[in-house]
Amino acid sequence: MASFFKNKSKIVFLIFGILIAAFMIYAMSFMTAYSHIHVVYKIEDGIISFPTTSGKIPSTNVANLYINRYFNNSQSIPAGLIGGSFVETYAKTIYDFNNSLNAFNDFLVAVGIVSIVALAVMFIFSNNSRRIYYKSNLIVGVLASLTIIVMSIIAIAWTFTLMGQFNENETLYKVVSVIQNPVNQGQQAYSTLIKPDCDILSMASGTNVIGFVVAMLFSLVLAGFAVFVIVFTIGKYKRTANERKEIIERAVAAND
C-alpha cells in the first residue's frame, strides 16, 4: 500500500486527465442531443412568439400545418396536450426549457473548464510527479479536487431537475421535434399531416432522458474520482512524512 501512494501518482493523474477530457467533450456535444427541440423564437414588447417562416425551418408548409392542425383542431391533438393557440399555450414552456438547457450546457462546459484548470494547478505543483508530498501538494490536491466535486454535485442535482422538466412536457417536445428537425422528416411530415388519421408522435425522434442520464453519470464519475484523488493526496502526504521530515531536517542543518 505504501508503494502505491509513492509510485502511482502519474497513473492516477493520467486517468484523472482522461476523465476530465471525456467530460469536456461530452459537455461540448450535449446540446446536440436536444437541438431539434430548440424552437426558433423572437421577443417583441416582452411577448414570445415563434415565427413559422424562419430559414431554420425548411418546410413552412409543415410548420403551418403543425400549428393549425395540432393546436387548433381538438381531434388531432396528441395525448397530454391541449388545444388553442400554440404561441399562447406553449411558447413560455418551450422557451423556458430552451433557457434551462442552454444554462445547463454552459454549466457543464464550465465544470469541464474548471476541472482542466484545477488539474493544471496540480500539475504545476507537481502532484503528478513528486515522489514526496509537501503541504503545498496537500493543500492544492485537496482544494482543487473539492472544487471539482462541488461543481459536479451541482451538475448532478441540476440534471435531476431537467429530467423532471423534460418528462413533464415530453409529448410537447417530441411534437416540436418533427418541425424543428425536418431535414429528413419534413416532406414525410407534410404528407402524413394532411391525412385524417395522422400521428405526428410516430414521426417524433427518439429524444429521451438518456442525454441527461449520461451527463449525470459523467458528473458522478468525475466527482467520485476527485474524491479518490483527495484520498490519494492525503495518503501520500502521510506515507512520505518520514522522508519529508528528513529532507527538512537536512535543509535546516545545512543552513545552520
Image (tube, rainbow, N blue to C red):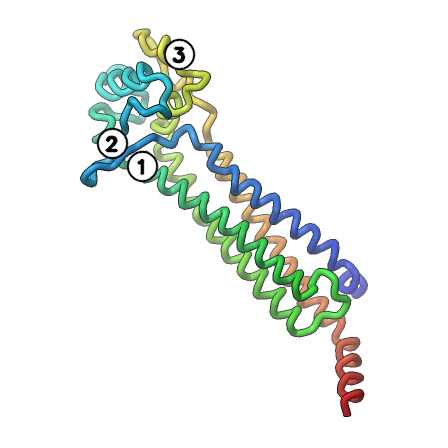
* Mark 3: amino acid: Gln
Q: CA distance from mark 3 to mark 1?
A: 26 Å
* Mark 1: amino acid: Tyr
Image coordinates for residue 121, horizontal then vertical, percent: 61, 62
Q: Where's the C terminus, which quadrant?
A: bottom right
Where disc 1 sits, the SS reads helix
Residue at 25% from the left image edge and 15% from the top image edge: 75
The answer to whether 247 is drawn above or below residue 5 in the figure is below
184 left or right of 145 in image: left
Image coordinates for residue 213, horizontal then vertical, percent: 51, 39
The answer to whether 59 is drawn above or below residue 124 in the figure is above
Where disc 2 sits, the SS reads strand
Tell me if mark 3 has few (under 14), some (14-19) or many (20+) residues whose alpha carbon lies within 10 angstroms of its own. some
Determine which of the numbered discs, if any, sits on residue 49 in the image: 2
The residue labelled by disc 3 is: 187
The residue labelled by disc 1 is: 95
Determine which of the numbered discs, if any, sits on residue 108 in the image: none
